[in-house]
Image: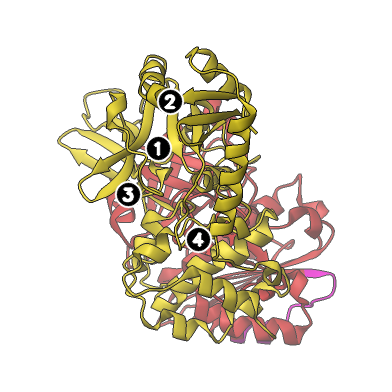
Amino acid sequence: MADRVIKKSELIKLIDRLLESYRVYAPVRQQDMTNFQEISAADQVDLSLANTTMSPKSIMLPQSETMFEFNLDKTSDQAAILRETEKDLSPRLIFGIRPCDAKAFQLLDLNFDTVAYKDPWWVARRKTTTLMGLACNAPCSTCFCTSVGSGPFSTEGLDLLLIDAGDEFAIQILTKKGEELLAKTSIGGDVSEATVNVVLARQESSLKAIESRVFTEGLKRHEVKAFFDGDFWDELQFACINCGVCTFVCPTCWCFDIQDEVHKDNGVRLRNWDSCMFPLFTLHGSGHNPRAQKLQRLRQRFMHKLKYFVDKYDQGVACVGCGRCVQQCPVNIDIREVFRLMNDLKV
Amino acid sequence: MENPYLPYPVRIDSVVTETEDRNLKTFKLIFLNSADREKFIHRAGQFAELSIAGKGEIPIGIASSPTEQEYLLFTVNKVGVVTTALHQMSAGDVIGVRGPLGNWYPWEQMEGKNIVIIGGGFAFTTLRASIVYLLHPDNRSHFGDITVIYGARTPGMLLYKDELAAWNERDDIRIHITVDAADDPNWQYNVGFVPAITQEKAPSAKDAYAVVCGPPIMIKFTLPILRELGFPEERTIMSLEMRMKCGVGMCGRCNIGGEYVCKDGPVFSLTQLSQLPGEY
């Protein structure tokens, strides 16, 4: 339940201590948003918000990153030969990540860390990054993590969990990585029974506060084609403007593009976030486009998360219930409603 | 850790313009490092990403057979940014190859069976790899009759014309070449669309696999004829195309239902395809 406690007044000291050993990423206020960014001082951290506007996926899968470099100078014997860009893979800490977002990393491991192929940057970053979670005492009305395999106090995918228990933070140590992190700080004391009781009470009240529910048993009831041919897609897609904000903020949307950029004789091959909401995502060189229609693109996003992924990995849906897409969608498309329509499908 | 995105450097050894419209060229590639060549072990039906530094990558079927070990062949249609850049390159230029990628025609299952290869237009590339593989002295005895039906719009649009003529002379492969129309009075082969020629030549479905590769319109009208001839769905094999980037099942764009064409395909039986949404 809790292994250590620190006084809230010690939090700054703890983070400063951690900054000596880790590159620390934490929620930081950025004008009208709060987002994860690398910090240089503990007082930059802002834990006041339920969750960040953007998910922390960019820490593992940057929105744009250089994969390879090359030169096009024909006098060089290395001309046009790609070489891997060196990355800073020193130890990192994500401080204050919510349990839902940590669960999302685990789901993305299924895509990027496979038997056949391993994405070298994803795998290396996962290995060198420690996740110190922050339990949610006050979930949002759009949170539905508890019905998709996570929860406000869920420890899945985390190395440590920090729980706000009034005047102090209780700390749960979950992995060897987490233990090593705490060993570097020598901050904190033993846990009293009173603290344990506070933690339990907060956990209970938080679980109760999540009133939003989705159901998933029905997603395995039919074959892919039954859902694909569902009559609800037309109405769902009507308002969609294919802006892609859902894929942009989503912690489990990982699709990417690869593009080359050249300046004079020097070039880079970049990997950039992409989105299934955009027609160019699937446009063939011939002009043919298997997902030319808005309906097809919207259907792809939900079918991927709630059916293709479910069937492929048998690890549940590719959604962690963070509610960001529900909050950000300009036309109020609500994935919880899509869950309902798909789960209740009768054939 | 192997980086699946890093291409092997290769040198263009030769460039052959295949068709009268000059839009299709075959590039013969030689690995710069012999260790890379040894790592590149492919089966007929697989593809690779060709990489041009500064332009990007394109997924292209491997036109050389695994039995042609010293080089790789790719026949490329000039369509977009990367293929146009490639068409402007010449022998000696350095590009990259990433692969082999995807699955292959089901050679293990097809062993001992008759093979009917049906191709149209510039989709004949991995079929060429297959024919060269099948006809290799080490492999020919492992397969039954081989029948090829290959069509293009005009005689000048056929790929690999010299090889077609040579195969036509052999008695261990039956080859039916056809064109939509020919204004050459000396044209000695068939005239007619691939589906019509398939119906006319009526290859037997007994103990046979059909491997079909061509433009959507050819596929659409050929499949019903194969069904009529008695080819069951599980012995009708197709190869699909999709826009791709990573080639290793990670970037998310080339899926049909839950299958990634780059990694789970590009080769599918009609049985497999019939389970998937028709989104391709």
Residue depicted at 17% across the width and 37% down the height: A263
The answer to whether residue B8 is visible is no
Instruction: Specify which label sits upstream in the sequence, 1 or 2.
Output: 1
From mark 1 to mark 2, how far is it between C-alphas?
10 Å
Q: Residue A345 shows which numbered tag?
A: none
Q: Chain of mark 4?
A: B
- Residue A321 placement (x, y as % from top left): 52, 58
Q: Which chain is yellow?
A: A
Q: Closer to us: mark 1 or mark 3?
A: 1
| Mark 3 lies on residue | B86
Q: Are marks 1 and 2 in contact (CB under 8 Å)?
A: yes
Q: Residues within 10 Å of mark 2 (few under 14, many from 20)?
A: many
Instruction: Specify which label sits upstream in the sequence, 4 or 3.
Output: 3
On whether disc 1 and disc 2 are found on a single subunit, the reply is yes
Colour seen for chain B: red
Q: Is residue A249 above or below residue A72?
A: below
Q: Is residue B249 above or below residue A24?
A: below
Q: Residue A92 shows which numbered tag?
A: 2
Magenta residues, as a range? B196-208
Residue B197 magenta-drawn?
Answer: yes
Residue type at numbered disc 2: Arg
| Mark 4 lies on residue | B254
| Mark 1 lies on residue | A59
Q: Closer to us: mark 4 or mark 1?
A: 1
Residue depicted at 74% across the width and 46% down the height: B137
Q: Closer to us: mark 4 or mark 2?
A: 2
The answer to whether residue A17 is visible is yes
Please indicate whether residue B199 sits to the left or right of residue B60 in the image: right
Element under disc 1: helix
Residue depicted at 46% across the width and 75% down the height: A296
Q: Are marks 4 and 2 in contact (CB under 8 Å)?
A: no
